[in-house]
């Protein structure tokens, strides 16, 4: 087809495609309203619980001066690249209700108020429960949510350091088992409740990670202590690298480094484990504190709401993995937003297929379905006419027996098409 129509036509076709997407962006909210309605009809989707989180995607290009590509905190560990921040709201089933592309240096805690208003405008006022990680809401926004005329509930993670305020109360409370390996405690304070949860599986996992990283850190320190020709500046640089690799485990050690001008020796460079910090870390592993203004009638339900945040993490993984939101080669901001918009439309199809599999073909995943169906091809059949023009007919190759069985299992029918019928072998 490219040989027949020429390169100029392909360029014009691609440019027209993105101009259409630019115009479609103006109707993004209407589109998401329509999708919400369809998901409610097809899958009885509920929107009382909303999961909110942010991610970033980077660009390997020179930083522009006048658009959303900025340097900022990179979730992809690419602080050397400019990026944009993407905020997303999904239901616990993964259905997206809205997203926004923001400047790459946007702070997480400045985004929630705008999204609360956007969802209310887009889908109307209703009792909703917002589930978020710590660092997203500010105290002012949480106060506004508590004082709203239409109840706006929240469930948010809380830094472990806040445990110190409640440790005495928590020790007097009994554990309530909400699942085989999960127990919770509740503490009420003013208009809020705090949920203290522990998971035995999480405890084992976090302790294994701590032991491995602490063992690696101690090995690095022993190696540095034996290097006699190392200067103090080189030592500090290597300690910085070791600190980054060890993460929070670095704070469990008390490390003494040489003063400027002093040589590196066992007397000037030594370390030990801080027993108080180690006991505190050991005691809090696999445990976390949640904060909410929901009624404390069922603490197990609160914990289940919070672990649903994994669904939004899965959405980001799909966007960056299977749906390949990166790399983005566009330079114009409008084209960048159009590219991300197309990726989100692909994600809408992806999550719809996921729910379809759950309904009709338990055990199948969108990836396995697409692996089966990708062997089918869409082709253009070009037929010359007597007056020198070309008749173009879009056809798909006939599905084989395995594909027919899969389509029947998913209750999906291919659209009819005129003859001739083309097999994949003929296409090859």
Image: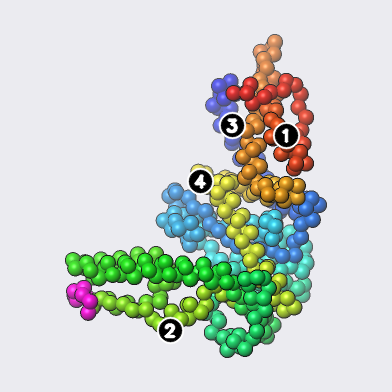
- Of the numbered discs 1 and 3, the one sitting upstream in the chain is 3
Q: Nearer the viewer, residue 8 or 163?
A: 163
Q: Is residue 194 left or right of 253 when viewed as pictured?
A: right
Q: At 70% from the left edge and 31% from the top edge, which residue is drawn? A: 401
Q: Which residue is mark 1?
A: 404
Mark 1 burial class by Cα count in 10 Å: few <14, some 14-19, many 20+: some
- Of the numbered discs 4 and 2, the one sitting upstream in the chain is 2
- Image location of residue 178, percent across then percent down: 68, 73
| Residues at circles 1 and 3 in contact by the CB criterion of under 8 Å | no
Q: Which residue is mark 2?
A: 276
Q: Which residue is mark 3?
A: 12
Instruction: Tell me the CA gap for discs 1 and 4.
Output: 34 Å
Q: Which residue is mark 4?
A: 327
Mark 4 burial class by Cα count in 10 Å: few <14, some 14-19, many 20+: few
Instruction: Tell me the CA gap for discs 2 and 3.
Output: 68 Å
Task: Determine whether the residue tagged by mark 4 lies in a helix, strand or loop.
Answer: loop
- Image location of residue 251, percent across then percent down: 40, 75
Residue positioned most to the top:
386
Mark 3, mark 4: which one is toward the viewer? 4
Task: Determine whether the residue tagged by mark 1 lies in a helix, strand or loop.
Answer: helix
Q: Is residue 11 left or right of 278 when viewed as pictured?
A: right
What's the magenta bit mostly, secondary-structure-wise?
loop
- Image location of residue 416, percent across then percent down: 78, 29
Mark 1, mark 3: which one is toward the viewer? 1
Q: Is residue 281 magenta?
A: no
Mark 1, mark 4: which one is toward the viewer? 1
Q: Nearer the viewer, residue 164 or 83?
A: 164
Q: Nearer the viewer, residue 68 or 222?
A: 222
């Amino acid at each position: 087809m490219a040989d027949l129509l020429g390169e100029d036509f392909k360029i014009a076709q691609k440019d027209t495609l993105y101009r259409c997407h630019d115009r479609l962006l103006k109707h993004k909210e209407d589109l998401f309203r329509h999708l919400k309605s369809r998901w409610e009809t097809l899958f009885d989707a509920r929107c009382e619980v909303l999961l909110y989180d942010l991610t970033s995607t980077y660009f390997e290009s020179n930083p522009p001066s006048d658009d959303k590509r900025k340097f900022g905190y990179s979730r992809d560990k690419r602080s050397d690249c400019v990026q944009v921040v993407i905020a997303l709201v999904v239901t616990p089933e993964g259905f997206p209700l809205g997203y926004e592309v923001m400047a790459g240096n946007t702070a997480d805690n400045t985004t929630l108020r705008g999204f609360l208003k956007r969802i209310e405008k887009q889908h109307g006022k209703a009792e909703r429960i917002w589930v978020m990680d710590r660092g997203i809401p500010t105290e002012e926004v949480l106060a506004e949510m508590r004082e709203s005329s239409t109840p706006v509930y929240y469930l948010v993670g809380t830094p472990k350091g806040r445990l110190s305020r409640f440790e005495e109360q928590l020790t007097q409370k009994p554990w309530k088992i909400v699942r085989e390996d999960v127990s919770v405690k509740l503490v009420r304070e003013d208009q809020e409740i705090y949920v203290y949860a522990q998971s035995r599986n999480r405890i084992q996992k976090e302790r294994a990670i701590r032991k491995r990283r602490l063992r690696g850190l101690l090995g690095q320190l022993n190696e540095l202590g034996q290097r006699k020709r190392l200067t103090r500046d080189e030592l500090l640089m290597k300690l910085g690298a070791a600190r980054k690799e060890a993460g929070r485990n670095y704070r469990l050690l008390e490390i003494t480094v040489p003063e400027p001008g002093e040589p590196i020796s066992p007397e000037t460079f030594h370390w030990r484990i801080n027993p108080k910090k180690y006991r505190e870390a050991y005691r809090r592993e696999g445990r976390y504190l949640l904060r909410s203004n929901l009624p404390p009638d069922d603490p197990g339900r609160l914990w289940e709401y919070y672990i649903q945040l994994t669904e939004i993490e899965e959405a980001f993984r799909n966007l960056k993995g299977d749906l390949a939101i990166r790399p983005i080669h566009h330079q114009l901001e409008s084209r960048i937003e159009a590219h991300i918009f197309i990726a989100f439309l692909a994600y809408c199809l992806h999550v719809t297929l996921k729910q379809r599999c759950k309904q009709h073909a338990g055990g199948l995943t969108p990836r396995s379905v697409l692996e089966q169906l990708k062997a089918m091809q869409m082709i253009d059949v070009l037929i010359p006419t007597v007056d020198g023009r070309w008749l173009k007919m879009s056809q798909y190759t006939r599905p084989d027996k395995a594909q027919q069985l899969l389509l029947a299992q998913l209750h999906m029918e291919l659209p009819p098409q005129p003859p001739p019928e083309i097999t994949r072998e003929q296409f090859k």
